[in-house]
Image (cartoon, helix red, strand yellow):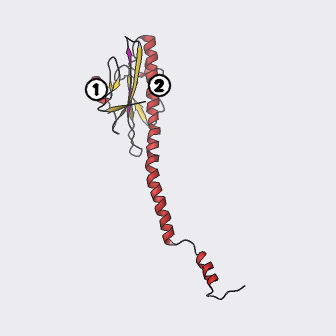
C-alpha cells in the first residue's frame, strides 16, 4: 500500500526513524558524568587501601619475626638482617635500612613518593615484651597525614617520639601523629 507524501502514518514512521535528539544525548552524557563523579573517588580510595595493605602485611610479619627472635635470644633484633623476613620486591613502600632499626622492636614502612601515584599513608610497627605477665604487645600505627612518618631520622629517641610508636614496657601509637590500625 502506498501512502501520499503527507499521510499521518508516513510522518510517524519518518519521525521515529530519525535517531536520538540532541537533548536526549545530552541527558545521557550528564547521567554518565554524575555516575563517574560518584564512582571514581571511591575507586581511587580503594586502590589506596589496597596499596597500604603491603605495609600492614610487612609490618605484621616483622612484628611476628621480632617475637620469634626475642623468644630465642632474649632481646629484640636491632637490624633487619637478624630477622628472616624478606623485604625485597616492595612496590609502594620502603623499610628502614636493614643495617639498623630506629629502635630494637620498632620498624617503619614509609610510602614511596611518586608524583604520578596516589598518596598513601606511612606505617610504623612495634613489639614490646612485658616481663611481669610474660606477654608480647604488638602495634601497627598509620600516619595521620599523607606526608607520612618522615625521612631518615638519625636521632632515634626523637624519631620514636615524633613518628609514632612510644616504646618502653608497652608499645602504643602516638596519638598526635598516628592512629592504631588492626
Q: Is residue 118 magenta?
A: yes
Q: Is residue 50 visible?
A: yes
Q: Quadrant of the C terminus?
A: top left
Residue 178: image x %, image y %?
33, 32
Q: Is residue 2 magenta?
A: no
Pick out the residue farthest to the right. Answer: 1
The relative height of residue 32 versus residue 80 in the rendered view (above or below) is below
Residue at horizontal 46 percent and vertical 34 percent from the top? 53
Which of 117/170 is in front?
Answer: 170
Which of 128/108 is in front?
Answer: 128
Q: Find residue 6 and name its label.
A: none
Q: In what element is the residue under mark 2?
A: helix
Q: Which residue is mark 2?
A: 61
Q: Is residue 94 left or right of residue 162?
A: right
Q: Earlier in the sequence, mark 1 or mark 2?
A: 2
Residue at horizontal 63 percent and vertical 78 percent from the top? 13
Residue 167: image x %, image y %?
32, 21
Residue at horizontal 62 percent and vertical 84 percent from the top? 8
> What segment is highlighted magenta in the picture?
117-130
Residues at circles 1 and 2 in contact by the CB criterion of under 8 Å: no
The relative height of residue 168 versus residue 142 in the rendered view (above or below) is above
Q: Is residue 96 visible?
A: no
Q: Which residue is mark 1?
A: 161
Residue 156: image x %, image y %?
29, 23
10 Å crowding of disc 2: few (<14), some (14-19), many (20+): some
Residue at horizontal 48 percent and vertical 63 percent from the top? 29
Amino acid at each position: 500500500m502506498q501512502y501520499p507524501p503527507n499521510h499521518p502514518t508516513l510522518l510517524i514512521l519518518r519521525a521515529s526513524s530519525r535517531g536520538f535528539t540532541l537533548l536526549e544525548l545530552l541527558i545521557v552524557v550528564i547521567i554518565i558524568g554524575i555516575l563517574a563523579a560518584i564512582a571514581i573517588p571511591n575507586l581511587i580510595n580503594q586502590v589506596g587501601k589496597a596499596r597500604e595493605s603491603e605495609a600492614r602485611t610487612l609490618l605484621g610479619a616483622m612484628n611476628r619475626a621480632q617475637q620469634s627472635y626475642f623468644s630465642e635470644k632474649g632481646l629484640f633484633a636491632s637490624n633487619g638482617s637478624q630477622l628472616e623476613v624478606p623485604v625485597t620486591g616492595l612496590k609502594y613502600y620502603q623499610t628502614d635500612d636493614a643495617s639498623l632499626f630506629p629502635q630494637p622492636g620498632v620498624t617503619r614502612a614509609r610510602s614511596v613518593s611518586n608524583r604520578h601515584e596516589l598518596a598513601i599513608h606511612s606505617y610504623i610497627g612495634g613489639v614490646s615484651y612485658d616481663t611481669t605477665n610474660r606477654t608480647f604487645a604488638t602495634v601497627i600505627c598509620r600516619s595521620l597525614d599523607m606526608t607520612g612518618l618522615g625521612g631518615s631520622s638519625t636521632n632515634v629517641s626523637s624519631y620514636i617520639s615524633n613518628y609514632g610508636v612510644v616504646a618502653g614496657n608497652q608499645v602504643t601509637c602516638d596519638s598526635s601523629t598516628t592512629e592504631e590500625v588492626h
